[in-house]
Structures are given as structure tokens and as C-alpha cells.
Image: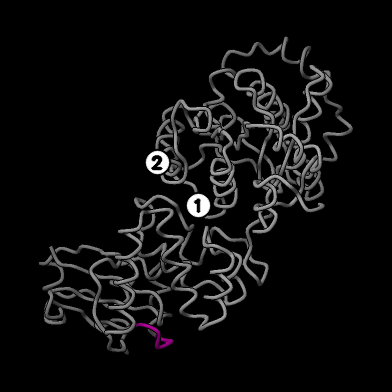
Amino acid sequence: MSTPRSPFLATALERGFIHQCTDSEALDERLLAGRLVAYVGYDCTADSLHVGSLVSIMLLRLFQRCGHKPIVLMGGGTTRVGDPSGKDEARQLLDDAEIARNMAGIRTVFAKFLKFGDRPDEAVMVNNADWLDELRYIPLLRDIGRHFSINRMLTLDSVRLRLERDQPLSFLEFNYPILQAYDFGELARRYQCELQIGGSDQWGNIVAGVELARRAERRTLFGLTTPLLTTGSGIKMGKTAQGAVWLNAERLSPYEYWQFWRNTEDDDVRRFFTELDLAEIERVEGGDVNEAKKVLATEATALCHGREAAEAAAATARAVFESGGSGSELPQTEVPRDKLARGIPAFELFSLSGLAASNGEARRLIRGGGARINDRVVNNETKPVTVADLDEKGVLKLSAGRKRHALVRPV
């Protein structure tokens, strides 16, 4: 892509947010001509998004800051079908109640990143069930399906890779690209939306929407994809050994979120510096890398959970790592006081706290010397932990290695 003149494309390119674009020069000219409307779609497969969605969220945020209008499309309809992109098997189909609960959880994420309202540059949230539920199947096949070539659809990565791996692909999933393309056209008609943004695995589906608009309505639309969010070592971001890095505090505490960014690889610090000015990034990055990671963690957490929660997480980290304290913002687990009075085996306590995924993993952690209670190494995996082990604040601070901590509190 040549150097863009529009602030949105120029900044997005500079920060590494762009992977592919259907016609970058024409899109650049259109952005310079006036306010544009763009959307990103999110299916409601869980009650939160995770950090794998952050690039597209941040791109929508940048889009709005440049004076344009974002649409967040909730896949109330397409979640019932299932997107085969990047998956080896069909995902579990959810009922309407589960989809509604998940949609409500996801809504809370976007309120932190975008400004919603009725003004021309304010975001709107739309549910594709509003039109997909009303579709009649035969007219859909006649009016929309005729613009899709089976030969072409079989070359889409979402379809081809599943077939190459000899994994079944249902006819329901095979229809997903058609429905996503229809969404784009419907948003163009209803909201004058001209740009679809998505992850790199959505390229085929996005192009299908651009081509459908051109063939069916002679309408010019644009598509833009973001790179897959990976670490410097090539590992897909969004999950850790302890599970997904969720964006909702109900799923993952602000402190744990802060710790995720604090523990990023050295080579990734520059890439993930949220909205700090690039000159400021250069300055911070030129100093101590661990201090730079703390700045990254605090800025990323402030965007997702608010400045107060970010500062509290940073203070907790200082208390835990630098002052030897416990830190009240650490993830907490409550156990019955009478059970603790009788004694809980150490391995069971580490499993209950979430620092180990299972009793077996907890036992291995202790055998390897990586477990501590109140900063003392645990040598015996079956050692009973009792109320006598509580610290002066009446809690137990559990540590798995040097970077993961949790509090256990009797109730």
C-alpha cells in the first residue's frame, strides 16, 4: 500500500493495523471526500470478546476518532449458523436465550471503546437477526445465491482448509459467506455503510460482500482486514495456558488483564502500545524494557477497564512484586473457614484458586518448586493449609512462579 493521505488509513498503516484492502487508493480518496460508515461483525459465541478482537476494536475506535461513523454488528442471526473460518469442526449451536445473554455481555465491552449515540460520527450497534430472521429461503437463493459460484466458494480458506483436513463441513456452515455478504449489502442500504473491517481470516467473506454489491446493485463497497494478532514468536494471541484473555471484568479481573500485558514478550512492546503517541513510544521503549511493559499494561488496562482500575492494578503489582505485600486487587477465592480450620491440602488450594487448571497440575507445580504460600516455598503437595497459615491481614497469598498470584480468603 502506498502512503495514504487520509488520517485514518495513514495512522492505521503506521500502527500495523492493516493486512489487506480491496482497493486502498480508492478507499483513501473516499475517506478524504467526507465522512464514511464502516462496520465490524461479531458473532455471539461467548458473553465476552477476548484480546484477539482488540485490533478490530481499536481500528473502529481510530475510525471514529478520525470523524467517521462505526457500526458494531452483532451476529444474532449468523451465530445460529456458525462461521467455519479458521475452525476444523462445527461449533456448538446456541439457542436464542444463550445468544441473547452473550450479546448483552459483549455490548458492555464496546461502551468502553466507542462513543454511541445519534450524531453522524457516533457509533451504533445493530443486530443482523433484524433482517436475517425475515428472509424467505427461496427468494434468497434466487436473488442472492445466483451471484455466488460454487467453484469460487470451494476455494475460500474457510471451506478449502476444512475439506483438505477431511473434516466435515455442514451445508449450514457453507451458507455463512452468503449471509455475511448479505449483511454488508443490507448495512449499505440501511446505513449507507461502505466499508467492512474484519480479521485476516475473513478476507474471503468480505470480498464476497464487495462483489455481491457490485454485481447485484452496481454499488462500490470496500473491504479491509487486520493482521492476525500474534506474539513476536508467532503464537496466536487471545489465550494463555490459564485460558482466554477476556475483555469483560466478570471473566477476567483488571489485575489479571494488566498482568497479561505486563508479561508480553520484549519484542512485542512497541506493537501493542495502544494509543500512546509514537514519539512517546520511542522514548519509553528506549529505556528499561520492564518499565516499558508496565506503561503498556497500564495504558491497555485503562482503555478496557478505566484509568482508576488500571492504576489500582499497577499499584497491586508494585505491592506484590516490589514491596512484598499481598495486594488487595489480586484475584480472590473464598473458602469456608471451617474447612480451612480442618486443613486443605496445598495442591487442592492451588487448584481452587485457579493458579492450576487441575489437581494434577497443582501437584506438578509444587513438585517443581514453583508454588509459594505467603512467599514461602511449598515443599509438600499434601501439606494441610489451615487458619494458622493466614497472614496478618487474614488471607493466604498463593504464588505460581514469579508472575502469577492469587488471594485465598476464609469466609
Q: Nearer the viewer, residue 7 or 96?
A: 7
Residue 51: horizontal and vertical position, in percent?
52, 55
The answer to whether residue 179 is above or below residue 310 is: above
Q: Which residue is mark 1?
A: 50
Q: Which label was assigned to residue 80? A: none
Element under disc 1: loop
The answer to whether residue 32 is above or below residue 391 is: above
Q: Please provide the residue range marked out in magenta.
A: 367-371
Q: Quadrant of residue 297?
A: bottom left
Residue 403: horizontal and vertical position, in percent?
41, 77
Q: Tell me how far mark 1 sits from mark 2, CA to CA.
A: 13 Å
Is residue 218 visible in the rendered image? The answer is yes
Query: What residue do we see at 54% from left, 34% from top?
Result: 72
Is 362 inside the magenta-drawn segment? no
- Residue kind at label 2, given as amino acid type: Thr
Residue 289: horizontal and vertical position, in percent?
52, 80
Residue 96: horizontal and vertical position, in percent?
46, 27
110 to the left or right of 316 = right
Q: Which label was assigned to residue 108? A: 2
Is residue 88 visible in the rendered image? The answer is no
Give the crowd class for mark 1: few <14, some 14-19, many >=20 residues within 10 Å: some
